[in-house]
Amino acid sequence: MQSLQQKATEWSGVATDDAFAIDETNLFQKLGLQTFIRLSTNFYTRVYDDEEEWFRSIFANSKKEDAIQNQYEFFIQRMGGPALYSQRRGHPALIGRHRPFPVTHQAAERWLHHMQQALDTTAEIDDDSKIKMMNFFRHTAYFLVAGDELKNQNQQVPCKHAAGR
């Protein structure tokens, strides 16, 4: 059985070493707080304005401002900055926090489409950082897809203790 990381690598087409190349440079120090805020604002503006109702509906129960803050705080924490997200919300636990949402291959690709556009239109982010960030985002998106599929399998398969009832 493949691990979630192995599935993420296979489905995303991003090798694990490339996905975690973000750890080779402190992107928070390099890019700064305001760049991460702009990136997340740019991204969620696109998400909330998406022409696809099925995609917008994933975010319907979230306030845009909260989504922006959660994302930039997570990005800052993950990319070398202070643990803003954990201080406010606890451990990121990405699979658990995304559990209520349909994290499908289609949703991941739509999310990545908007993130690529947000990266491309955030002028302060240099090309090398964009590549590292997008590799991390692509791999992580498919890590979440793998986690979602595991969640769905677990919901459909009764445990061995329930089988005898």
Image (spheres, rainbow, N blue to C red):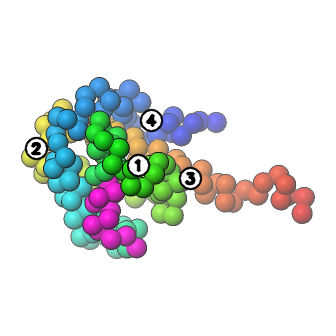
Rendering quarter of residue 132: top left
**Label 2: element kind:** loop
**Label 4: element kind:** helix
Q: Residues within 10 Å of mark 3 (few under 14, many from 20)?
A: some
Q: Which mark is residue 149?
A: 3
Residue at x-position 36% and y-position 31%: 20
Residue at x-position 67% and y-position 54%: 154
Look at mark 1 in the image and give the residue it sits on. Answer: 86
Residue 116 in sight: yes
Look at mark 4 in the image and give the residue it sits on. Answer: 9
Point out the stretch of residues depicted in magenta: 61-71
Q: Residue furthest right?
A: 164
Q: Nearer the viewer, residue 79 or 85?
A: 85
Q: Hey, what amino acid is under mark 3?
A: Glu
Q: Nearer the viewer, residue 28 or 4?
A: 28
Residue 94 in sight: no
Look at mark 2 in the image and give the residue it sits on. Answer: 124
Horizontal placement of 161 versus 97: left or right? right
Asked whether the residues under the numbered discs 1 and 4 touch, taking CB atoms below 8 Å apart as contact, a structural biologist would say no
